[in-house]
Image (cartoon, rainbow, N blue to C red):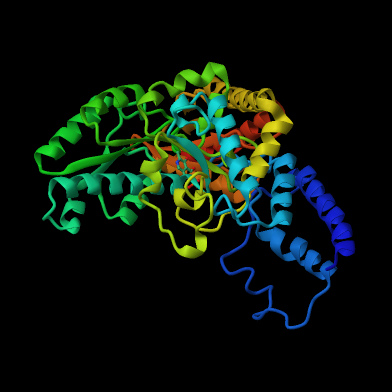
Amino acid sequence: MDSTEFRRRGIEMVEYICKYLETLEDRRVTPSVEPGYLRHLLPNEAPFEPEKWDDIMEDVESKIMPGVTHWQHPRFHAYFPAGNSFPSILGDMLSDGIGCIGFSWAASPACTELETIVLDWLGKAIGLPDHFLALKDGSKGGGVIQTSASECILVTMLAARAQALKRLKSQNPFVEEGHLLSKLIAYCSKEAHSCVEKAAMICFVKLRILEPDAKASLRGDILSRAMEEDEIQGLVPFFVSTTLGTTGSCAFDNLYEIGREIQKFPDVWLHVDAAYAGNSFICPELKPLLKGIEYADSFNTNPNKWLLTNFDCSTLWVRDRIRLTSALVVNPLYLKHGYSDSAIDYRHWGVPLSRRFRSLKLWFVLRSYGISGLQKYIRHHIDLAKRFEKHVLTDNRFEICNEVKLGLACFRLKGSDKINEKLLSSINESGKLHMVPASVNDKYIIRFCAVAQNASKHDIDLAWDIIVDFANEILEKDQA
Ligand code: PLP
């Protein structure tokens, strides 16, 4: 493909994307295919000779699309949103066109510097304390874009582990590191995302999973009691991962209490995972949800969830960048450059070496919408979730199972878990609507998240009508 054809195909592709997004409603939300469906439609080997572009695009519609789950569909209410917007798509397109790999400042200075600036912009908009901002005088902190929240939690745990091991080694110079490692213990709530468990597996450290209160919030006294007990057993608490906006029910750990309690353990790293909810703190009225952030060592949120930015764009801020990078620095000659001592090299802030120019799309989004446009979008989703909550509350066969603070409402039919499982599976099988369940306080609940960028009140009302129709049918059968 030469640039003349690229121009033509580019226009066609933009047209295809627009049409796809504008007519999404005509498609099932979820595909009705079985595992392996695509293997039967595509050849076993890559073509030896080049194929025609039109043939490839024809296969997109006839073979790929039937297996796609349409996350941008107005009736997709599962998980959390997958950020998507035209400015973000165009930013990513430009990033692909430039095609630089910004692992160090020298590898592409603009790639590094824009990331630092944009992370400061977003950090300020969220209301993070100044010590998390890279360009603030006297600050040792800064922000970085990672691929996912899981990676943010992994790298902060790795940093905390390195710091703890260094300290233990200096106190016990003749004890083997493997033995010291076996003493380290991290903490999170039962409601924390499973990626905390995965990070602990990778870091080879113990993880104590604590019971939250009835509102699915981890409390300070529960945590400090557990840490004290573990210290008595000879273990060394080194990392706590708290969650603001849990995956199951968008609950909030009591960060303020936890932060205060953790002052008794000055060597413990306090991380805040706000993968979804953190984006909403750009709204002044939601900033109280961030109370206690002054105690945190690191904070992450995913603009690729709820800030109109396409995957991947997971933002992480740390209070002390040297503490982060000291766990991750390796310095072969071929990666050194003349400004290694004075410039940021993001390769030291994460696991991969190669990095895309991801800050471009976030910069495009922040500039095209402005903070005011993004606040409007967040508030709109919250209004939609509250509208859904109202529907649930008007039908006394149902109950609401969370405090609807943001764009997620959790509900269930009053009755057994089994009947709720049946309700959800029937709805999902129909392809009319898509939601996922969660278990909160050992109860099976159904999550309804406002997801589509331009979802309207009408979409919410329609979704509720679908749920009621299925519930009527299931309850009738159940009583028969
Ligand atoms: N943390 C929370 C609170 C989440 O809700 C999620 C995913 O939904 C994650 C972490 C994992 O996110 P990622 O897919 O970016 O690793």
Residue 55: image location, x then y, percent: 82, 70
Residue 241, compared with residue 96, is above or below; it is: above
In percent of width and height, residue 158 lies at: 34, 49
Residue nearer the viewer, 53 or 479: 53
Q: Is residue 140 left or right of residue 78?
A: left
Residue at screen point 75% across, 41% down: 86
Task: Confirm whether residue 136 shows in the render.
Answer: yes
The residue located at (48%, 36%) in the rendering is 142
Q: Residue at x 64, y 55 (%)?
A: 31
Q: Quadrant of the N terminus?
A: bottom right
Residue 293: give x, y in percent of width and height. Answer: 40, 25
Q: Residue furthest bottom?
A: 48
Q: Give the answer, above or below, for where 295 lies relative to 43.
A: above
Q: Position of residue 425 (x, y in %)?
A: 52, 47
Answer left or right for 456 relative to 398.
right
* Figure check: 29 above or below 192: below
| Residue drawn 65% across the image and 46% down it | 110
